[in-house]
Amino acid sequence: MQKLSNTSDAAPAQGGLLGGWISRRALADELGVTEDTLRRWDAARSGPPCIRAGRKIFYRRSAVLDWLEEQDTRAPRGRGRRQGRGGRR
């Protein structure tokens, strides 16, 4: 993912007070997850860092991209079928 797109609910990418920030709704759309998933990640401190401005939640675009890169390096390689107990051999 190179660049998070700009949607009507997101802050403008350049200029303006909120340039470089994206709303929770816009980020959820970009990542293909629900806003509830982002809330759970925030509560578990496992998602991208966010800030609160009153009732609104915003994510710095650069921090989201860094977080995505970090997830890529954390992902286990070579996922295959796991043999559980009592499985066929």
Image (cartoon, rainbow, N blue to C red):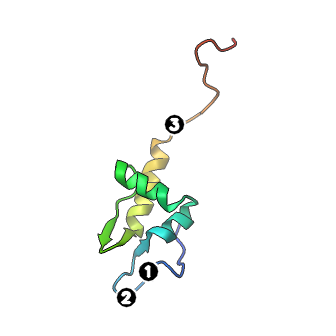
Residue ID at (51%, 71%): 26
Q: Which mark is residue 79?
A: none
Q: Quadrant of residue 64?
A: bottom left
Q: Are marks 3 and 2 in contact (CB under 8 Å)?
A: no
Report the residue marked by disc 1: 11
| Left or right placement of residue 68 versus residue 79 in this view | left
Q: Secondary structure at mark 2?
A: loop
| Residue occupying image coordinates x 43% and y 80% | 11
Residue 45: % across, % down: 34, 50
Q: Is residue 28 visible?
A: yes
Rendered location of residue 41, percent (x, y): 41, 52
**Disc 3 to disc 2, C-alpha distance:** 40 Å
Q: Earlier in the sequence, mark 3 or mark 2?
A: 2
Q: CA distance from mark 1 to mark 2?
A: 8 Å
Label located before the other in sequence (1 or 2): 1
Residue at image x 42%, y 57%? Answer: 39
Marks 1 and 3, how far apart at CA: 34 Å
Residue drawn at (58%, 14%), measured in percent from left and top? 85
Q: In the rendering, which numbered label is found on residue 16?
A: 2
State left or right for residue 42 relative to residue 79. Answer: left
Image position, residue 89 (x, y; %): 69, 11
